[in-house]
Image: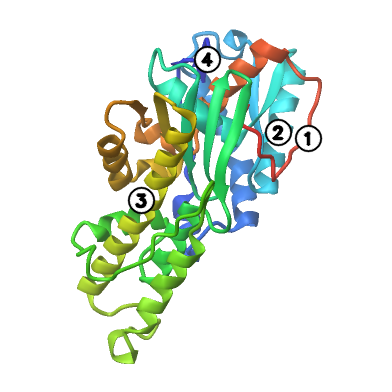
Amino acid sequence: MVRDGREIVSSIVASQVALHAPHGGVVPELAARAHLECIGPTVDAALAALPGGWDDVDALSVTRGPGLVGCLVVGAAWAQAAALARGLPIVGVSHLAGHVYSAWLSQAGFEPPFLALVASGGHTECVLLREHGDAVRLAGTRDDAVGEAFDKVARLLGLPYPGGPAVERAARDGDAARFPLPRTRLEGAFSYSGLKTAVRYAVRDLGESGLTRGGTPADPEVVAALAASFQAAAVDQLVDGLEAAVERTGAERVAVVGGVAANGALRTAVNERLRGLTVVVPPMSLCTDNAAMIGAAGWHRLQRRGGEAGFGVDPSLDEYA
């Protein structure tokens, strides 16, 4: 819940990590059911920060997409019903716009134009927010998103879900130079399928004696080295692409957002390699999916367009403004 688009009044997150961890990834049907069960109590918990509860709410913002269709339907239907019952304006916003606005939300005075690297489980893109409501995509992934690659590599190494934090933890004790892995460089694009496949081949080449019955590396030092080598290559590709976008646009303000922005190696590399620029990486609580960023994006949309009578969900929505 946000006030005037920028002040976070409350931010309540109902995590599903424990629900999906036994499956090694998100199960859409389970996610939608859990979303339905949690949305009411989660909203009630958020409203507890307001003395008047619903009476102090002026408008609603909800994610239209992209995302899992079942979860999007639950959220949009619930929000539109609440808006109708309370007579409140409502806006449907892009999940991606929310990530971009997490940077705006996290630092006072950080205004467009700024360049944003959106790095998450489903997206790896560079976006230039020229002004509120005006964004242009400069580069995107040709195949896997970086967060998806982290999850898949974690499974190859026998590490738990979610893969990003697990790989980062394992990499702390690893020799990043032990396994030379490729850094795919494409003009105006990212690519992670080759890096993921290189890790698969490195695991295969350990031979049966070096693998567990489940086909993952048996030696913890090998797991750590592969995790460190993968993370170094993945981060290099992200920062290389971001630097290319900075050179192309002349941007002086840069944001790194999305779930992968919580990665410590990425945060360090961005700050080291983009010295001299204004760099914003949101706090951990605003990197992963959260309602506050959707509130900030919705506040701006409401200022420009007003409330919307109705809208549908769009699982492949790719707008940033």
Q: Is there CB contact under 8 Å for labels 1 and 2?
A: yes
Q: Looking at the picture, how far across and down is residue 87, in whole percent?
A: 75, 12
Label 1 – label 3 distance at C-alpha: 36 Å
Query: Which residue in the structure is indicated by mark 3?
Result: 235
Task: Give the residue at x 40% y 58%.
Answer: 163
Query: Which residue in the structure is indicated by mark 2?
Result: 76
The part of the image, by quadrant, that contains residue 287 is top left
Residue type for callout 1: Gly
**Label 4 neighbourhood size at 10 Å, few (<14), some (14-19), many (20+)?**
many
Task: Give the residue at x 22% y 65%.
Answer: 177
Nearest to N terminus: mark 1 or mark 2: 2
**Label 3 neighbourhood size at 10 Å, few (<14), some (14-19), many (20+)?**
many
Residue 243 visible from this viewpoint: yes
Would you place residue 79 above or below residue 318 in this image? above
Q: Looking at the picture, how far across and down is residue 298, in whole percent?
A: 61, 21
Task: Give the residue at x 54% y 34%.
Answer: 127
> Which one is in front in this view, the residue at disc 3 or the one at disc 2?
3
Query: Which residue in the structure is indicated by mark 4?
Result: 5
Would you place residue 233 above or below residue 83 in this image? below
SS at mark 4?
A: loop
Label 2 – label 4 distance at C-alpha: 20 Å
Query: Which residue in the structure is indicated by mark 1?
Result: 312
Nearest to N terminus: mark 4 or mark 1: 4
